[in-house]
Image: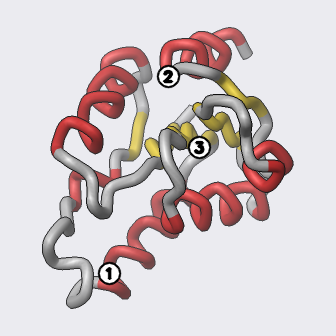
Amino acid sequence: MKVYLCGPINGCTDAECNDWRSYAKSRLPDTLDPMRRDYRGREAESVNEIVELDKRDVAASDVILANCPKPSVGTSMEVFLAWQQGKIVIAVAQEPVSPWLRYHSTKIAPTIKDAIDWLESI
């Protein structure tokens, strides 16, 4: 199963972007990490490239692992796109969880570890 590592990037620190993704990649053998194309600081001139390549990654994935520690337009759009494409969407979020996120997710987990444990069990 190919897993897309979905979560906030714009306005986030290196640690916020990379720490959870590094952990996920250590446990999941086949991932697509949008941070391999780090556009922070160049978002305005890279709009089309960012969106088109992220949409391509979502389409190429079987599962979306969406880390949702705070509101993120890009993360929300990717979750919705994945849901429209019939993908498994595992959202990592703390209560209260947005009804929109809950509706468009296959599973809500409280931690990245719990999400990956669930994914490995299916």
Do the residues under discs 2 and 3 have CB atoms within 8 angstroms? no
| Of 10 and 62, the residue lying toward us | 10
Image quarter of residue 63: top right
Please name the residue that numbered disc 3 is placed on.
64
Total label count?
3
Q: Nearer the viewer, mark 2 or mark 3?
A: 2
- Give the residue at the far front of this rendering: 96
Q: Residue 115 at x, y = what percent?
A: 59, 21
Vertical placement of 103 versus 53: above or below? above
**60 or 121: nearer the eye?**
121
The residue to which callout 1 is attached is 49
Q: Residue under circle 2?
A: 112
SS label for mark 1: helix
Q: In 3D space, how far apart are the residues under numbered discs 2 and 1 (Cα atoms)? A: 28 Å
- Give the left or right position of residue 59, taking residue 39 as reference: right
Q: Which amino acid does label 3 sit on?
A: Ile
Q: How crowded is mark 2: few (under 14 residues within 10 Å), some or many (20 or more)?
A: many
How far apart are the two marked residues, 2 and 3, measured between alpha carbons?
12 Å
Residue 8 as seen in the image, left or right of residue 72? left
